[in-house]
Amino acid sequence: MAVSTANVHLPGIFTLHHSLRRAIFSVVLACCCWAAQAASLAPVAAEHGMVVSAQQLATRAGVEVLRRGGNAVDAAVAVGYALAVVYPAAGNLGGGGFMTILLADGRKTFLDFREKAPLAARPDMFLGPDGNVVEGLSTEGYLAVGVPGTVSGLETALARYGTKKRYELMAPAIRFAQQGFVLEQADADMLRTATAEFRKDPAAAAVFLDHGETYAPGRRLVQADLAKTLRRISIDGVQGFYRGPVGTAIVAASRAGKGLLTQADLDQYQTRERQPIECDYRGYHVVSAPPPSSGGVILCEILNVLEGYPLKELGFGSAQAAHYEIEAMRHAYVDRNNYLGDPDFVQNPVDHLLDKAYAERLRAAIDPMKAGVSSDIEPGTAPHEGSNTTHYSIADQFGNAVSVTYTLNNWFGARVVAPGTGVLLNDEMDDFTVKRGEPNLYALVQGTANAIAPGKRPLSSMSPTIITKDGAPVMVVGTPGGSRIITAVLHVILNVIDYGMNVQEAVDAPRFHQQWLPDSTFVENFALSPDTQKILLGMGHKLRRSRQANHVAAILVGAPSLGGAPVGANRFYGANDPRGNTGLALGY
């Protein structure tokens, strides 16, 4: 933290001898720095492995797998199934997501188990006779549901990279569903957000409401139908979900609810294994999500731009650093929203967007003293040629690391449960471009590359990321948060690499977000001081207060901060985001 003596005013201090003045200032500066450090708890430290997730029961399930000799992929499968029970707002069997994997032998891979548009989907399926978007049609009910991918993804990960038996990894989830788990205050608060919608769906109400009302803290949430579904998966794997009684029930529920899912949709679903997006930033190597996620491409595009600015010297929270970060976000989101989509359907200009020379052109377009105007920064205009999810991070004793983000899209997805299955279904169809120029649930204004098509996967912002040094993992990070996922991950990376924070401080620090349109930067409380905001407003920035969001789950390997010293024999340092009250960082 750079502090100038010219800006410190203490009564009478400048009448003292110069050496005494310097001594007093040093004490003041030390106290300020101590207060900043004391604002965060120390990262959770462990010797053999670490799990960070948004729900403490799921974290404990993953740690137990590591303790019994399982690897990071085994633990990821156990956590994924457990979250489907204990974190129903976003943990799921009826959604989809991404998994970035770094193996101890140096191999890097990415599993794409994103939901797909049903085979009967049409580009105009959410428009009325007047050609306008019908409100709520793409976010609630069965028409909003994409083909689920989570079970396929977890089972693919286990078959290709895991070491444990499925029944062992699923046992905690089955137990939590069959016997129930006691709701904490944060669990009950989350259920309350969807109470009105649950009342519209009898199957959802039967599970998530207590005689028509929200469950109170201290009550036990039992999900007997979900336990049956999990047992079928435990016995039959993928077929236990996509076929047989569960698949039949999902298709029947969709048909009854005027949705589009058919047995053919379930039969044809497959997880895709892809090459991760990779880039370098100040001597570290970034491994992240490729299309149909925009996460890795846009994260790397922003980092490429910011690498040309001396952020460390400018200082955390300074107006100049914030200006450069906002403008890099603005330019990158133009590209995100207009050029990227499912690689099976569109040609993504990945090499161009990741080119360091392109980053130089973007920097040249950024006025160091003036905010950009989003309406003037459009596709085809030089230099641009023609919240709700959950994340968990895991690192094991063998050198493997796994970063997983999966989602139902909105909290509790489409707010419908297929009767007899206990499975909440997603509303992922809203992540497509429902109509060009119209904002989606996350206010993203997107282009035709992300238009709805049968069998297509919608563009995502999910950014499960692993950072390496000399081939070994040093950071595992990711977050939920819709369009703000990319910038939240970005902030944590900058906080650790540029600003020297330990992993917990990096996660705790308030954040801001710019996504091109709307032409406002969303700012969390305390992210920018009043003086900094005044300077940014004078530069032409539009600032808007943002609610807290993004439960970041992060792990540093080696020490609590880059270049720091380990604490005893501990090699793993986990940070659970205080923005969520249900998560836990835990190792052994």
Image: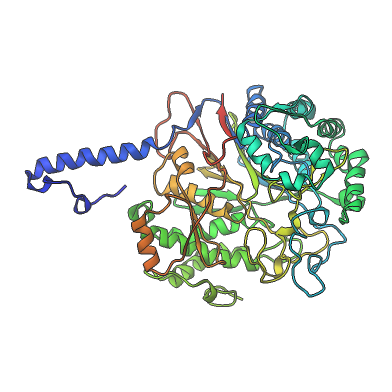
Q: Identify the residue shown where x is 88% and y is 56%.
A: 258
> Which quadrant of the rendered structure holds the C terminus?
top right
Q: Position of residue 547 (x, y in %)?
A: 53, 51
Q: Which of the 4 quarters of the picture holds residue 106? A: top right
Residue 143: tell me if it is visible: yes
Q: Position of residue 123 (x, y in %)?
A: 79, 68
Q: Residue 163 location, x and y as percent?
A: 72, 30
Query: Can residue 165 be seen?
Result: no
Which one is nearer the viewer's eye here, 77 or 353? 77
Q: Is residue 536 left or right of residue 353?
A: left
Display colour scheme: rainbow
In this rendering, is residue 207 above or below 118? above
Q: Nearer the viewer, residue 281 or 80?
A: 80
Q: Position of residue 485 (x, y in %)?
A: 58, 52
**Height in image: 340 above or below 112?**
below
Question: Relative to the observer, which residue lies in front, 564 or 357?
Answer: 564
Relative placement, left or right, of 128 versus 391 is right
Q: Residue at x 75, y 36 (%)?
A: 158
Residue farthest top in this picture: 68
**Quarter residue 177 falls in:** top right
Position of residue 296 in the picture relative to residue 531 (left or right): right
Q: Find residue 71 and report its image quarter.
A: top right
| Number of numbered discs overlaid on the protein picture | 0
Report the residue at 47% width, 38% height from top.
504
